[in-house]
Image: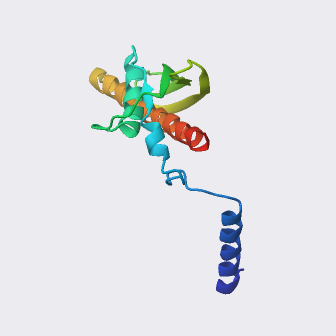
Amino acid sequence: MFTKHAFRSFALVGLLALSACGFQPLYATQEDGSSVSQKLAEVNVVPQTTRVGQLVRNEIVKSTRPAGTHAPDRFLLNLEAKGSAQTLIDTADTVHRRLAYNLTTRFQLVDAATSRVVFKGRAFSRVPYDRLDASFANVQARVNAEEQAARQVGQEVRTRLAAFLATN
């Protein structure tokens, strides 16, 4: 077992090594005064035609361009969100079923000035839910699963955009 002194020494060495590698917090203000938050505000998320696509878009917009934030559109973010339900457990009496809502979203960050794709990727979420005999409960469970999956995918896309923009 480590003693308190050995643990503190190990932690200090780890912190010194981390500072020597050039680690920089993602949301820190750069030397030129810019920040990832400012760069994210320059991303215009293209409106979506599907409900789940709009849910993903809303999640990204609320964290990149909060109400009242205005910045020039330096980038366009194209999204393609596709969701589907998958049966996980199906009992013989069909009273109880366990399903999962799968959401896959492909995204492309396009430079608005040159129309060139500068970053692209894919985000995925899987949210399990139950199906019962009550039809309204089934509809609400599916809607809740879609909304939760859209939140998770939107947050992942935003984080990946932030990491990309922090390095460029």
The residue at 44%/44% (across/down) is 37
Residue that protrudes farthest toward the top in the picture: 49
Viewer-proximal residue, 17 or 146? 17
The residue at 61%/43% (across/down) is 167
What quarter of the picture does the C terminus occupy? top right
Is residue 145 shown left or right of residue 3?
Answer: left
Residue that protrudes farthest toward the front in the picture: 32
Question: Relative to 79, does residue 35 appear above or below in the rendering?
Answer: below
Question: Relative to 13, does residue 126 appear above or below in the rendering?
Answer: above
Q: Position of residue 120 (x, y in %)?
A: 60, 26
The residue at 39%/13% (across/down) is 49
Colour scheme shown: rainbow
What quarter of the picture does the N terminus occupy? bottom right
Q: Position of residue 17 (x, y in %)?
A: 71, 67
Q: Position of residue 154 (x, y in %)?
A: 46, 33
Viewer can see residue 90: no
Viewer-proximal residue, 9 or 125? 9
Picture quadrant where residue 151 is located: top left
Viewer can see residue 111: yes
The residue at 51%/26% (across/down) is 102
Is residue 147 shown left or right of residue 113?
Answer: left
- Number of disc labels: 0
Is residue 40 shown left or right of residue 16?
Answer: left
Q: Position of residue 161 (x, y in %)?
A: 54, 36
